[in-house]
Amino acid sequence: MHAVKLLCDLTRNRGGAAAVECGLVITMFLMVTLGVIEIGRYAMMQQALIESVHAGGRYAVVHGSKSTAPATAASLESLVQNSSSALTPSQVSVTVTFSPNNSPGSTVSIVATYPWTPIVPLLKLSSATLKATSITTILN
């Protein structure tokens, strides 16, 4: 009889249940919020890389061999690396290929990569390499 009374007392005692529930809900809320932030960072950096590569491509289109300031592989690499404040220039890897050269009618291919690493270690997200490509025809 004493064990039954003790069991009934334990099932009626709700002290601390709200604290446990709150702890579980806050943990889940923070994990979802931090996950959304990380996905947002990934998308922002990918978009910044894409815009940088396209800026290099637009520059190459009008700065061919007949231009007063012809684009070179080195100048395009520098432009792509430094055109976004969201990316660390030294971490942007750029490859520029002219086919066959930088004269009008030729094409220029710009490929850039950037390492992305999460900033919240609790989520156990893996690192990734962002990549963007631009292939344009030189007009000038």
Image (cartoon, rainbow, N blue to C red):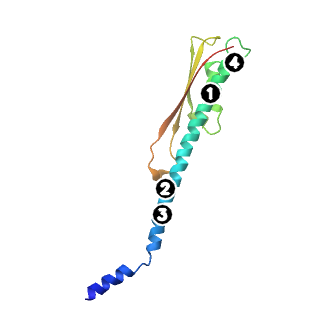
Q: From the image, tell me which residue sits under label 2.
A: 31
* Residue highlighted by disc 3: 25
Viewer-proximal residue among 77 and 4: 4
* Residue in the image at 50% along x and 54% along y: 32
Alpha-carbon span between mark 2 and mark 3: 10 Å
First in residue order: circle 2 vs circle 1: 2
Q: Visible in this render: residue 78? A: no
Number of residues whose C-alpha sits closer than 10 Å to that of mark 3, classed few (under 14), some (14–19) or many (20 or more): few
Residue 82: give x, y in percent of width and height: 65, 32
Mark 3: amino acid: Val
Quarter-wise, where is residue 2 in the image?
A: bottom left
Most foreground residue, 72 or 48 = 48
Q: Is residue 65 left or right of residue 43?
A: right
Looking at the picture, how far across and down is residue 85, in whole percent?
Answer: 65, 38
Nearest to N terminus: mark 1 or mark 3: 3
> In 3D space, how far apart are the residues under numbered discs 2 and 4 (Cα atoms)?
47 Å
**In which quadrant of the rendered image does the C terminus lie?**
top right
- The amino acid marked with disc number 1 is His
Q: Is residue 32 visible?
A: yes
Compare marks 2 and 3 and give the one earlier in the sequence.
3
Compared across the picture, whether 29 is left or right of 137 comes to: left
Name, please, the residue furthest toward the right.
Answer: 68
Label 4: element kind: helix
Residue position marked by numbered label 1 in the rendering: 54
Which is closer to the viewer, label 2 or label 3? Answer: 3
